[in-house]
Image (cartoon, coloured by chain):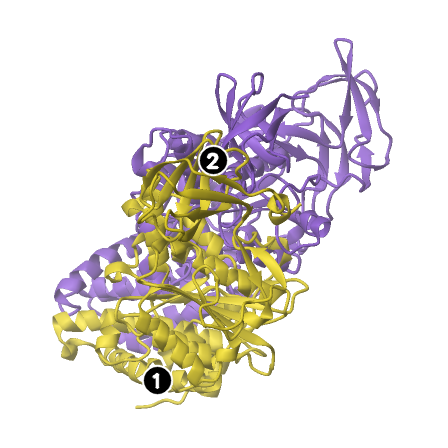
Chain colours: A yellow, B purple
């Protein structure tokens, strides 16, 4: 029996026994027959209705988290209705092209959604033995990603950014350019905005409209001025639709979720209100497991044509990658694309710090038949040469560039060309993987042949063209 | 049967029930109308606190709790190998076929071992009715997979006179294959038995780990070796390659049985093992790797309480094959997630937290777990020596090795493979930092290398370590004053260290030739580099050559040497000898000798 079946059809029960209100929590006394995680409707004295869910239930007291906040709620005269079901989203293919609030209600003035099915927003863990290992190369047209941190279909690859960095522009560029070569398949974009500013949401909306993709996009918006508790629901609502489209409607779904930092902060708020023992920096000890129930909802499964590729965006507080939010995210996701303020300040777009970035699923998505036989070697060599060049750069600031050996100076020239020629590209520039690799060889050829120790001799013979 | 109680409170994975008088600590219980599986971890009067291994969404106060009367146990018998289980030994394949869903549904009841499958049992020669048998006595064998002969033993808590032994034939695990009698009581023995996961299986004697557990990874086998029956931890921030290294161990190590616990990690990583291991060949036997592997998967989005159990379920299986006389490798990825599960449960129980919210018994739980590793003489006849080697990943928050799980783990392990973010950023894999890593087994496995590879091994290894340590100091100087002021010998140290790093320590897990390096190849590569260093040092110190001349004169040979790790296959190591001689000859020519 599924959770939905279990609780459906149970009677609605109503209480007016709010005993205490603390932060976003209501304590309701004298309840019976209330289920853990059940959904709740709270009716204020003035008739306003809010929604919430049961976080803890005992024989006497139920603890209810109110999504829209507890402002204005009183202990007398407030009706709390337990609805006898868990939070479910009515899903349908018609949701593409529509705009919803953070709880999944349409806010674009369009007709109501006729549900093809209702799904629990918490989802269920994908059975590891039902997963298919992701290995289809997605060409994003961005060299730093395709060449060195390749994205594959079904991967969860976050953008680690900082406030003010162009993560939205990059995410939009990827959403526009991403293709699996040689395929014409149904795709869709599910976009979840969590606590972002109105103009950011507008940027994405305009972008989807301009590119004509809007009919393939479902947007779930929880903006900065809306209640924080809804942020815990928004990504789950969006991914519930994504799962339906991928596994029941055979679509390849790209889920963009921004900004996960706001999500984690809402989680900390609710944990503090419940007086739980805090982990690092006040974030709850279970934040890892909680984030995993979002990020792990990506992938591909046996017998299903569709897939979910996830691209969450988060802004690192103070650009600190060891902060609990990026740290725990990095432990769950399959790599990360890190944006770098110093590259950005030097006018390089996209300002991707390749050394700190990583795609864990790259190895299966590249090589002969997928990209090109020399891809893995080239990527390794770019990494090792660029990291050596970075060491030499800091050395040069101490002892002066003149004191470096001739070979070391070539490394500095390589690094400069790497950043200006390979990394840097236009917002609308869509490079094929061959172009990307050719540019890579062009910048690698600045180095003497014998420095390319990560590359097999046959590839050097084929692609290396020595330059003075 | 067990007691029946009533739920009074639900808070996430914690359920509290009344009317539980008579329930045991750590008893398995079934919770609510869906009969979700849980385990009692605190008793107060008639009230029991239960950690539930499945999602408690929709459970209500007033629903029943059923005691089972036995603790969390593992079914041990033929059919374990090649399986993928969840944290409480439910086969995930069966869950999939039974529910017809790609998701893991709640409350699914499936048998850990196949009940219908028939195994061909061969009784052991020379056993006669009336023989007195001790626990662990060998009764017969079953070919579990082409790679592993399953030795059917008398369970640890059974002994007595043999009354009956089945003849050769095909049996299911429920068939009785032997009857023993002790003090007038007859006991039936089947192909399987159950064992409580939290209790270590008994053995006769513990031995010193002296044999290396070869892995084909150069930095491990040569610099920081693991021994059969040893314990090791592999800590590292995200992206440093913990999982790739552990997959490498599971794939290439010379263990006979591998148990891989994916504890709170990514679903796709388990899928990767599931898809790859049936195709990949064990380098030591040429058979598909899956035939020696058991997977336990509690991915990060699966219920947290089962994460805590998965570690015990895995190590109990490891001990079971150890008792049969096999060398078993247990890989736990990651023990930090297990510790976090402990923390979450402790927090829900409102226990007093120690460091960073972890319960005060974190250290003792870690100690108990790692202590279940070891090389032992098993119980029973004939004498069998088996081992359990434990390699546990640690995921320190922010890559900070002073955090509680890493610092406590260090107290109980003998090998420390510290992964380094800076190395990973420059794609130096495996990113094991040679300055802070250590192995207490380097001394104990020396004999094996000297007997089987070369008596020079230990000296060359020490010299390599010294060069790398010296390089680290010299680099400090370079950071302050640049390379100009360095002495020629120190410049040579930098040069050789770069050869060692690029040509020996770096290893590409995805290159067919480089991924697995046999001991002889490892030794020859090391030998070529150290011989070069010795000879060059003599010339440099005598003032006959400077390092710049060496670097220019031997540039092509150096790139050849650095590439040898992926251009010279294991069966053509004489090419490294030839290259070494060329380097040494050219060096003496340059030096005018």
Which residue is disc 1 drawn over?
Answer: A425
Seen in the image, is A75 located left or right of residue A256?
left
Return the disc, 2 or 1, that comes first in the chain's sequence: 2
Quadrant of the image occupied by residue B123: top right
Q: Residue B138, how many percent across, how many down?
A: 72, 28
Which residue is disc 2 drawn over?
Answer: A57
Image: B299 above or below B532: above
Seen in the image, is B355 located left or right of residue B222?
left
Q: What secondary structure is marked by label 1?
A: loop
Query: Which residue lies most toward the top here?
Result: B183
Quadrant, the N terminus of chain A: top right
Q: Residue A169, how many percent across, how many down?
A: 35, 77
Image mark 2: chain: A
Cα separation, mark 2 vs mark 1, equals 55 Å
Q: What secondary structure is marked by label 2?
A: strand
At 48% from the left edge and 86% from the top edge, which residue is drawn?
A434
Q: Nearer the viewer, residue B90 or A122?
A: A122
Q: Is residue B434 visible?
A: no
Image: A394 above or below B534: below
Quadrant of the image occupied by residue A161: bottom left
Image: B485 above or below B84: below
Q: Residues within 10 Å of mark 2 (few under 14, many from 20)?
A: many
């Amino acid at each position: 029996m599924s959770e939905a079946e279990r609780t459906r059809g149970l009677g609605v029960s109503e209480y007016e026994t709010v005993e205490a209100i603390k932060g976003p929590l209501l304590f309701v006394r004298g309840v019976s027959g209330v289920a853990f995680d059940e959904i709740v409707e709270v009716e204020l004295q003035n008739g306003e209705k809010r929604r919430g869910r049961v976080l803890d239930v005992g024989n006497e007291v139920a603890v209810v988290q109110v999504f829209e906040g507890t402002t204005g709620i009183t202990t007398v005269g407030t009706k709390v209705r337990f609805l006898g079901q868990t939070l479910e989203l009515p899903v349908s293919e018609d949701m593409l092209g529509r705009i919803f609030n953070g709880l999944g209600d349409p806010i674009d003035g369009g007709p109501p959604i006729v549900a093809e099915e209702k799904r629990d927003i918490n989802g269920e863990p994908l059975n590891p033995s039902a997963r298919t290992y992701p290995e289809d190369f997605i060409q994003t047209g961005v060299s730093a990603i395709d060449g060195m941190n390749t994205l594959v279909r079904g991967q969860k690859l976050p953008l680690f950014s900082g406030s003010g960095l162009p993560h939205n522009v990059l995410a939009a560029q990827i959403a526009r350019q991403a293709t699996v070569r040689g395929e014409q398949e149904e795709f869709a974009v599910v976009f979840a905005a969590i606590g972002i500013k109105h103009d950011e949401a507008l940027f994405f909306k305009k972008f989807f409209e301009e590119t004509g993709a809007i009919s393939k996009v479902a947007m779930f918006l929880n903006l900065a001025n809306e209640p924080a508790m809804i942020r815990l629901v928004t990504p789950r609502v969006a991914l519930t639709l994504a799962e339906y489209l991928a596994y029941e409607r055979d679509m390849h779904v790209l889920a963009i979720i921004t900004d996960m930092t706001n999500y984690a902060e809402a989680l900390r708020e609710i944990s503090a209100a419940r007086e739980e023992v805090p982990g690092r920096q006040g974030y709850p000890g279970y934040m890892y497991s909680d984030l995993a129930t979002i990020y792990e909802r990506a992938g591909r499964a046996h017998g299903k044509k569709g897939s979910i590729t996830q691209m969450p965006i988060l802004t690192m507080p103070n650009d600190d990658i060891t902060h609990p939010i990026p740290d725990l995210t990095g432990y769950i996701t399959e790599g990360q694309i890190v944006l770098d303020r110093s590259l950005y300040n030097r006018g390089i777009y996209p300002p991707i710090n390749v050394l700190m970035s990583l795609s864990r699923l790259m190895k299966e998505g590249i090589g002969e038949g997928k990209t090109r036989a020399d891809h893995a070697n080239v990527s390794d060599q770019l990494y090792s040469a660029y990291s050596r060049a970075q060491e030499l750069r800091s050395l040069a600031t101490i002892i002066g560039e003149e004191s470096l050996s001739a070979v070391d100076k070539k490394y500095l020239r390589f690094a400069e060309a790497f950043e200006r020629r390979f990394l840097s590209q236009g917002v609308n520039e869509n490079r094929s993987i061959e172009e990307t690799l050719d540019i890579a060889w062009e910048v690698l050829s600045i180095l003497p042949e014998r420095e390319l120790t990560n590359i097999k001799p046959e590839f050097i013979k084929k692609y290396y063209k020595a330059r003075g | 049967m067990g007691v029946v109680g009533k739920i009074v409170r639900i808070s996430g994975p914690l359920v509290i029930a009344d009317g539980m008088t008579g329930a045991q600590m750590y008893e398995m219980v079934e919770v609510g109308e869906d009969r979700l599986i849980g385990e009692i971890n605190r008793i107060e009067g008639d009230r029991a606190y239960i950690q539930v291994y499945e999602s408690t969404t929709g459970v209500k106060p007033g629903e029943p709790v059923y005691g089972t009367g036995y603790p969390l146990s593992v079914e041990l018998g033929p059919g374990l190998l090649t399986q993928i289980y969840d944290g409480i030994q439910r086969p995930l394949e069966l869950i999939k076929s039974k529910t017809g869903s790609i998701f893991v549904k709640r409350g699914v009841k499936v048998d850990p071992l196949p009940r219908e499958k028939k195994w061909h049992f061969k009784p052991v020669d020379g056993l006669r009715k009336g023989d007195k048998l001790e626990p662990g006595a060998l009764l017969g064998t079953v070919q579990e997979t082409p790679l592993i002969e399953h030795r059917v033993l008398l369970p640890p808590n059974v002994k007595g006179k043999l009354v009956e032994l089945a003849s050769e034939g095909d049996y299911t695990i429920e068939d009785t294959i032997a009857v023993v009698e002790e003090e007038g009581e007859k006991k039936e023995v089947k192909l399987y038995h159950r064992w409580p996961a939290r209790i270590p299986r008994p053995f006769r004697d513990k031995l010193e780990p002296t044999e290396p557990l070869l892995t084909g990874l150069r930095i491990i086998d040569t610099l920081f070796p693991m021994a059969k029956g040893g314990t090791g931890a592999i800590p590292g921030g995200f992206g440093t390659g913990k999982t790739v290294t552990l997959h490498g161990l599971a794939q290439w190590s010379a263990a006979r049985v591998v148990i891989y616990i994916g504890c709170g990690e990514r679903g796709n990583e388990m899928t990767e093992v599931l898809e790859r291991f049936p195709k990949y060949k064990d380098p030591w036997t040429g058979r598909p790797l899956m035939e020696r592997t058991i997977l336990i998967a509690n991915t990060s989005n699966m219920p947290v309480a089962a994460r805590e159990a998965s570690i015990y379920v895995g190590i109990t299986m490891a001990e079971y094959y150890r008792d049969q006389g096999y060398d078993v490798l247990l890989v736990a990825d990651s023990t930090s997630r297990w510790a976090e599960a402990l923390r979450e449960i402790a927090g829900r129980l409102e226990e007093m937290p120690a460091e960073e919210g972890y319960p005060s018994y974190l250290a003792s739980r870690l100690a108990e777990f790692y202590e279940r590793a070891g090389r032992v003489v098993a119980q029973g006849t004939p004498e069998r020596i088996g081992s359990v080697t434990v390699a546990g990943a640690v995921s320190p928050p922010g890559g900070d090795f002073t955090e509680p799980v890493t610092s406590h783990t260090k107290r109980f392990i003998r090998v420390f493979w510290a992964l380094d973010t800076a190395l990973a950023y420059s794609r130096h894999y495996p990113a094991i930092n040679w300055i802070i890593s250590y192995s207490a087994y380097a001394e104990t496995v020396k004999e094996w290398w000297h007997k089987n590879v070369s008596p020079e091994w230990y000296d060359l290894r020490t010299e390599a370590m010294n060069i790398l340590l010296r390089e680290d100091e010299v680099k400090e100087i370079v950071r302050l004053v640049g390379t100009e002021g360095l002495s020629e010998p120190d410049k040579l140290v930098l040069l050789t260290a770069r050869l060692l790093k690029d040509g020996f320590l770096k290893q590409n897990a995805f290159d067919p030739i480089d991924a697995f390096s046999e001991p002889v190849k490892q030794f020859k590569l090391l030998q070529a580099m150290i011989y070069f260093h010795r000879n060059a040092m003599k010339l440099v110190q005598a003032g006959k050559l400077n390092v710049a001349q060496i670097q220019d004169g031997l540039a092509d040979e150096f790139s050849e040497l650095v590439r040898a790790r992926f251009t010279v296959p294991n069966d053509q190591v004489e090419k490294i000898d030839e290259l070494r001689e060329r380097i040494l000859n050219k060096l003496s020519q340059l030096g005018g000798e």
